[in-house]
Amino acid sequence: MKSVFFGAVSATALIASAVHAEPQAEVLHWWTSGGEAKSVAVLQEEFASKGGTWTDMPVAGGGGDAAMTALRARVLSGNAPTAVQLKGPAIQEWYEEGVLADISAVAEAQGWADVLPASIAGHMKCEGTWCAAPVNVHRVDWIWANADVLEANGIEMPTTWDEFNAAADKLAAAGVIPLAHGGQAWQDATVFEAVALGILGPDGFRKAFVDLDMDTLKSDEMKAVFDQMRTMRGYVDENFSGRDWNLATAMVMNGEAAFQIMGDWAKGEFMAAGKVPGEDFLCASVPGDGFLYNVDSFAMFNVDGDDKKAGQDLLAELIVGQNFQKVFNLNKGSIPARIDVPLDEFDSCAHLSAKDMSESSDNGSLLPSYAHGMALRGAQSGAITDVVTAHFNSDMSSDEAVNMLADAVANSM
Amino acid sequence: MTKWLEENTPKLVLAPSFIAVLIFVYGFIAWTAWVSFTRSRLLPRYDIEGLIQYERLFASPRWDTALNNLFVFGILFILIAMVLGLILAILLDQNIRTEGAIRTIYLYPMALSMIVTGTAWKWILNPGLGVEAMVRGWGFESFTFDWLVNPDMAIYTVVIAAIWQSSGFVMALFLAGLRSVDGEIIKAAQVDGIPTWRIYTAIIIPSMAPIFLSAFIVLSHLAIKSFDLVIALTGGGPGYATDLPATYMYAMAFSRGDIGQAASSAMIMMMVVFAIVVPYLYSELRSKDD
């Protein structure tokens, strides 16, 4: 009896969906922790209020590794989710496997090209068609500082690497750990790319980490980058190996350490501890020009059925919509990807980030972060990170590191 | 019909598991071997491209480190765990009163997962929290024990934790072996006035050869498969100083979208296992034939 009843219901549902094409979306993501989960729930509610049915598919673990494994299995079995949290060149990598959908119709109707910075829009396109929707912009090249510690030692936020070194020496003499850092490969890479942006400049950075230009990778400037990394190694406490980034942030918060170089997710830690930007902690871009971004996005996969296609279009529209961009980024500590979202409710660091983003977008120094998988494919960025972390954690010379870097990049092709 | 059933029941019962093993073990070994000859990146591709992945693998300094670490870790771990296990077993074999309790204590680490062992040792060996901080707290300010954060020494911390975990198990194996030696021979030797250490070196230990072999096989496959301990204890760091082939393979397959590299490293790992297991199987089969 029961099964007959359910059969009838699902048959009605089938007819209904054939008539109305009720939007359906299955969304694969790994935003499962506190603020992130809240942010996804916002999107879910909006989707439901427009009459859609959202099937959540959160796969946590390994910073997205587990989700990617699940995605691979789904795609190989010919049953891809509607939308998947993907970013950077991974989007194009999946496109080349022939599994991404074209959402140009929505993008053009919503005028995405006018509201997204050009270089970020570039990541959302696959050979000229739109195939992904951006969610946020994290800035990676931030330097965070404990305001009281700087004041007590008479130090201003550094604007050149020499100033940073001088400040760090002074702090070390005063018994404060100059740089809070966690010895994990991706954190080493985060500091490295911040230093590289400062020393190579935006053009050099693009040549080295976007174009993989061998001459730049082997240049004297690159040696200078590794020299600065060696100097920075001296500013880290001896107990840094394997430390998580949020514990390093806590060291800045409680005054044990003065600076941390980390993306703006660190701001979330400060805020959660009730610290006020500009008073308790300071934020500034690392010495040098440019802006390194880490943009989360949803890639749209090929799906069958009008209901799913309708779901895909609705989802894309909502993700780039003003409301979701505002609410999500307030929760996550990043800034909206679209430039026309009012920033009244955002904090001063976010205002600085948004201002710098539009300036660097105009002068061509808005650059993808290599350490967070925006600039290069996994194999290449992984090869660079291997060298960076091997150099930082040993007594390797800069000459040796530069040669290893060139070899590793060549070998990863 | 019943006769046919009687004859074929064993085959019928074994067939499903036989087929499952054929497909899911040997089938996928063959699949991995195939993929290791291709240029697979994010998803597997099936156009054979030759030995390119193996060339890349052996050109990678990280793989060099991983393979070196496997040998350092494997040799030290197997050797020390066996020696320590044997000594513990012999000491326990002296008819001491609380043997049951002590045996349980030594076996207990086996009950923990490698993740727990790794996390506990990570805290013990952390210079800012563990042994170094404690000894310095006692007033020995210049004491340093920073192996965990020293890239040259970090692999030895993995050895220490693995030995702590496994030597109790080896002890149990050897203890069973010691107990299975014929008591009459030992008594005869004692009557002849042969010193105890000679009884062990000349009679008991030589007669335990099969146990040594089993212990060796169990420990060596534990060493080659080691993954969770490294992930929990050092995360492969500092840098990639404690990478093992298994962690290398994981990084390539699941973090970097380089399935070809992962497949070729998996094949090399399998060859290392074969190099150990095949001689063992060969000797086993030959002794059956005799």
Image (cartoon, coloured by chain):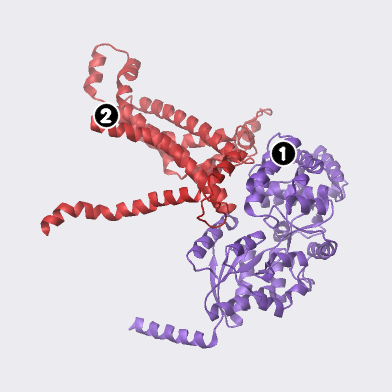
Residue on which the image places disc 2:
B180
Which residue is at 71% across, 53% downward? A370
Tag 1: Cα neighbours inside 10 Å, few (<14), some, or many (≥20)?
Answer: some
Residue on which the image places disc 1:
A403
Q: Which mark is residue A111?
A: none
Residue B152 drawn at (x, y percent): 62, 32
Q: Quadrant of the image for the C terminus of chain B?
A: top left
Q: Quadrant of the image for the N terminus of chain B?
A: bottom left
Question: In which chain is the residue bearing label 1?
Answer: A
The image quadrant that residue A142 belongs to is: bottom right
From the rendered image, report the letter of the chain displayed in purple. Answer: A
The amino acid type, in three-letter code, at marker 1 is Asn
Between circles 2 and 1, the one closer to the viewer is 1
The amino acid type, in three-letter code, at marker 2 is Ser
Q: Nearer the viewer, residue A106 or B34?
A: B34
Residue A310 drawn at (x, y percent): 58, 80
Q: Is residue A132 visible?
A: yes
